[in-house]
Image: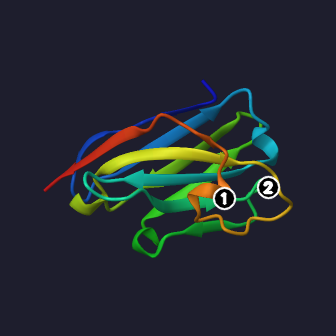
Amino acid sequence: VQLQASGGGLVQAGGSLTLSCTASLIPFSTSLMGWFRQAPGKEREFVAAINRISTSQYYADFVKGRFTISRDNAKNTVWLQMDSLNTEDTAVYYCAAGVNRGHSNNYYDSARHDWWGQGTQVTVSS
């Protein structure tokens, strides 16, 4: 397993969850890291990304101010802190890693990411 995501679960609206993703067998410290999600019947969509040295974080408009992405290269781990969850956040969340291309362009594009985790289910109840 190259990317192992965990931390999903059932939470009430307004609550919080923290997802984590631990990498192995990939060059984590030099990789762009991202989180994507896919709700039932919908296409996979970008949630957040962070560059290799944590100087830039990128967010989808619908999570700005609610979600925070962070990473620790010494631990080969990236996190997604999710606050003020609502029912529309219900989805399978995937972490992804993009090989170092010298920039973070197209961070929102699935094709920019080369390795994917198995996903973790987040369910928000009303």
Q: Which residue is mark 2?
A: 53
Please report the residue visible at 77 percent of the width from the left and 48 percent of the height from the top: 99
Residue at (42, 47) in percent of width and height: 93
Left or right: 90 with respect to 8? left
Q: Quadrant of the N terminus?
A: top right
Residue 49 in which image quadrant: bottom right
In the picture, the quarter occupied by the C terminus is bottom left
Q: Secondary structure at mark 2?
A: loop
Residue 88 position, x and y percent, is 26, 62
* Residue 36, image x, y percentages: 48, 54
Q: Amino acid at mark 2?
A: Ile
- Above or below for 8 versus 53: above
Q: Which residue is mark 1?
A: 50
| Residue at (66% x, 57% y) in the render | 112
Residue at the limit of the structure toward the top, as seen here = 1
Judge by depth and name the residue closer to the eye, 52 or 17: 52
Under mark 1, the amino acid is: Ile
